[in-house]
Image (spheres, rainbow, N blue to C red):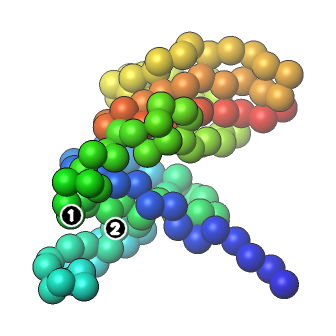
């Protein structure tokens, strides 16, 4: 039996601002942006983004539809690193992301497992930018 994680949901304030951040600041591809309806018949969108050229897990950008969901925006893991963005060239991506205004909350560090720095997405969720050794 073979299994993979297809999507990880990221709760966002608004679709277009989230798409802009992921595609422009992080250089992700917009995989899909399809209008749909929720179970109550309200308009929503099925929005998937992924790192350029990534064959793996995609991020489902899900607009908060109530106060409880909205309270989780930027706090999906209670302040811990949420996602790990692997790269084949740490310094290239770090420099590009800094130039595009991405906020790094922990500067680059050489660890035994690789080079890593922590950045925040537009909502404050923490991510590792990581090049494994």
> Horizontal and vertical percent for residue 109?
68, 15
Say left or right for 68 vs 3.
left
Mark 2 falls on what kind of element? strand
Left or right: residue 101 versus residue 3 is: left
Where in the figure is residue 20, as x and y percent of width and height? 27, 48
Q: Visible in this render: residue 14? A: no
Q: Position of residue 77 (x, y in %)?
A: 49, 41
Q: Quadrant of the C terminus?
A: top right
Q: Nearer the viewer, residue 9 or 91?
A: 9
Q: Which residue is mark 2?
A: 47
- Does residue 98 sit above or below 107 in this rendering? below
The residue labelled by disc 1 is 65
Kindly indicate the quadrant of the structure image that contains residue 3.
bottom right
Seen at 52% across and 53% down, the residue is 51
Residue at the spot 70% in from the left edge and 71% down from the top edge: 4
Q: Which x, y percent locates residue 127?
A: 53, 35
CA gap, disc 1 and disc 2:
15 Å
Q: Residues within 10 Å of mark 2 (few under 14, many from 20)?
A: many
């Amino acid at each position: 039996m073979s299994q993979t994680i297809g999507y990880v949901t990221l709760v966002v304030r608004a679709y277009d601002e989230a798409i802009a951040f992921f595609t422009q600041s992080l250089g992700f591809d917009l995989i899909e942006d399809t209008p749909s309806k929720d179970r109550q018949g309200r308009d929503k969108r099925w929005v998937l983004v992924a790192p350029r050229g990534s064959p793996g897990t995609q991020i489902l950008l899900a607009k908060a539809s109530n106060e409880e969901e909205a309270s989780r925006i930027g706090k999906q893991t209670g302040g811990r690193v949420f996602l790990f963005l692997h790269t084949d060239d740490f310094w290239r991506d770090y420099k590009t992301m800094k130039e595009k205004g991405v906020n790094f909350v922990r500067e680059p560090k050489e660890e035994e497992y690789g080079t890593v720095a922590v950045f925040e997405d537009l909502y404050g969720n923490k991510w590792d930018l990581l090049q494994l050794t």
